[in-house]
Amino acid sequence: MKRIVITLLLGSLASWALAQNTQTAAQAAAAALAAADDAPEKVEKPTYWTHTAIMNLNFGQTYLSQWVAGGYNNVSLAGNVDVTASYGKNKLKGTNRAQLDYGFLYSADKPIVQKNKDRIYLESIWSYDSFVKNLAYSASFDFKTQFHNNYAYGTPATQKDADGNVMEPSVKDWLDARTLKSGFFAPAYLNVGIGAKWTPAPWLTLNVAPLSGGGVFVTIPQLRKTYGMDLKDGSTTDYNSFRAEFGAQIKLDMSWLINDVFSFATQATMFYNYLTPKVEPRFTWDNKIVWKIAKYFALNLTTNLIYDPRVMVRDKDKDGTLDAKGVQFREHFEFGFTYTIIRKH
């Protein structure tokens, strides 16, 4: 009997202790839940800036051995950097972009390295949404030039040795036969405008700036006539290095990301100078097609078209003097390494 009483007493004590522990745990859990409810929710920090950098490095090579149809061994190397910084907060939006291109080639027919790609293009557009859907007030800026001199290579004069044999032209002969075509700030185009931006679709933007001012720079004296600079007052041979412009600019941008591997972008710009109403507008049209073949390799096709009625591009009388306007066109088809960086903050 005594053992039964002791057993029942111990069991009662154990049950009471277990109940106390359970009640304490329940109270602790309830307190933790209450504290969690009172804690502020973690809010994700908004992102206003998006930075994108696309870098390309393209290589080309041709080798011929006893090739009857003719041709020359050559190698080429070209690089491109396209950096964009976009901003968006409430009604204020902005895009800053820099495109840098540079390339050269070496061909067996000339013992010199020739430049075949050179471009600096900076542009910026900021807008503030108006009361009309898809329409915003805008301010724009663009600037275009190149890194350094570019030449056209003529045929060197024939040189003979003491025995009358024709000698191969030297590097100096090729350099003496070249003609300077352009250079850094020769020319350079600067434009700042105020107007309106229409964005009817994410892939389409039309910016109209009826108040645009800027100018054209040609710092190399011998190129000023070719690029349509005005004569200095009282001179028949000395041209100004700067020409002021004030007019209207229209810029159309379209960009399609068709799928994960294929994209297309185009930009057309027209500028009409109020100061020279009888002169035709200046027009440029740039296109870029990218076909991504592998993670870091792609085919790139770019074209650039320019029509500037003040720039002489053709030799009308075939006497070596550029004295006629025309359309300038350039095309590059390249394969190489490509790398993209995207960062938001």
Image (tube, rainbow, N blue to C red):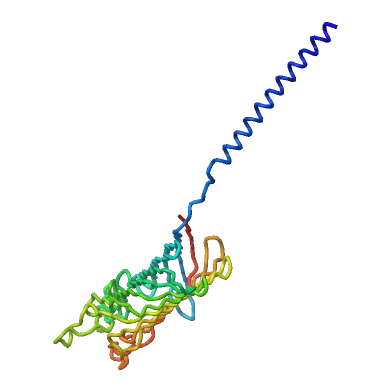
* Residue 193 in the image: above or below residue 225: above
Q: In terms of image quadrants, where is residue 217?
A: bottom left
Q: Give residue 310's quadrant in the image.
A: bottom left
In terms of depth relative to the viewer, which is nearer, 51 or 153?
51
All told, the count of numbered labels is 0
| Quadrant of res 293 | bottom right
Residue sitting at 49 percent across and 77 percent down? 67
* Figure check: 237 above or below 101: below
Horizontal relation, residue 270 to residue 26: left or right: left
Is 254 left or right of 101, judged from the image as shown?
right
Q: Residue furthest right?
A: 1
Q: Is residue 79 visible?
A: no
- For the N terminus, give its image quadrant: top right
Q: Looking at this rendering, what residue extends furthest in the top direction?
A: 2
Q: Is residue 291 left or right of residue 104?
A: right
Please say whether residue 273 is visible from this viewpoint. Answer: yes
Q: Is residue 52 above or below residue 323?
A: above
Front in this rendered view, residue 69 or 11: 11
> Which percent across, then down, holds residue 280?
34, 88
Image coordinates of residue 193 in percent, x first then y, are 34, 75
Most extreme residue toward the left is 234
Q: Position of residue 312 (x, y in %)?
A: 31, 86
| Residue 221 on image: x %, y % | 21, 78
Q: Nearer the viewer, residue 252 or 77?
A: 252
Q: Quadrant of the C terminus?
A: bottom left
Work out whether 79 lies above or below 28.
Answer: below
Q: Nearer the viewer, residue 120 or 268?
A: 268
